[in-house]
Image: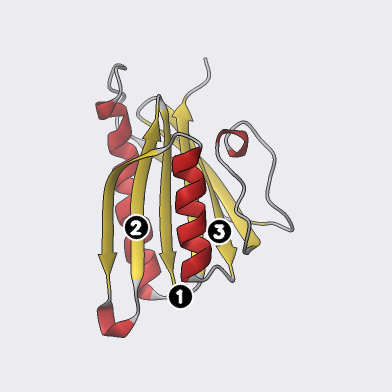
């Protein structure tokens, strides 16, 4: 993964950590726990991925999960997602009720990178895209 995607990914993780402050929940400790990335062969089926549309394009590469401030999050990294695939996924997310909270787009050295945070109720969805890779972060309130 190139530097621009790493940068956008870090920005989106930080944005996801801010989602609890936007929701009507008590603030947590702010401590972050993140697992190692694990290889994937297909789009996973779990309580996180069932909240969002599955991408129509791209090949799942890996996933990771963690928690922070009373929220748990799950991330999936896909390759072979071009700009049209990203735009289609953004539209699918909006059609599913995930509304934009913040967006960033940059073009360092001519390489376009896109970062976006969306929210639907207590669920957060962040997208990081660059160099035909998409990282989908899904945040949900921690289970009791």
At x 34%, y 45%, the residue is 117
Is 131 located above or below residue 95 in the figure?
below
Q: CA distance from mark 2 to mark 1?
A: 13 Å
How is the model colour-coded? Answer: secondary structure
User: Taking the image as drawn, is residue 11 in sight?
Assistant: yes
Residue that label 3 marks: 77
Q: Are marks 2 and 1 in contact (CB under 8 Å)?
A: no
Q: Is residue 27 above or below residue 138?
A: above
In the picture of the structure, the residue carrying the numbered disc 2 is 115
Q: Decide: marks 1, 3 in contact (CB < 8 A)?
A: no
C-alpha gap between disc 2 and disc 3: 14 Å
Where residue 83 appears, as percent x and y from the top left, is 46, 69
Q: Residues within 10 Å of mark 3 (few under 14, many from 20)?
A: many
Circle 3 — which element? strand
* Near-viewer residue (117 or 67): 117
Q: Is 74 placed left or right of 24 in the picture?
A: right
**Circle 2: element type:** strand
How far apart marks 1 and 3 lie (CA) works out to: 12 Å
Residue under circle 1? Answer: 131
Residue 39 appears in which quarter of the rendering? bottom right
Q: Is residue 82 above or below residue 119?
A: below
């Amino acid at each position: 993964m190139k530097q621009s995607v790493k940068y956008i990914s870090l920005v989106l993780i930080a944005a996801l950590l801010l989602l609890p402050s936007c929701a009507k929940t008590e603030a947590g400790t702010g401590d972050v726990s993140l697992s190692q990335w694990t290889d994937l062969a297909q789009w996973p089926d779990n309580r996180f991925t069932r909240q969002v549309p599955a991408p129509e394009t791209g090949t799942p590469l890996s996933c990771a999960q963690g928690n922070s401030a009373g929220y748990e999050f799950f991330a999936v990294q896909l390759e072979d997602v071009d700009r049209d695939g990203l735009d289609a996924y953004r539209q699918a997310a909006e059609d599913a009720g995930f509304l934009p909270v913040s967006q960033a787009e940059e073009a360092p050295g001519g390489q376009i990178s896109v970062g976006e945070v969306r929210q639907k109720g207590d669920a957060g969805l962040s997208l990081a895209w660059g160099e035909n890779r998409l990282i989908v972060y899904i945040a949900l309130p921690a289970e009791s």
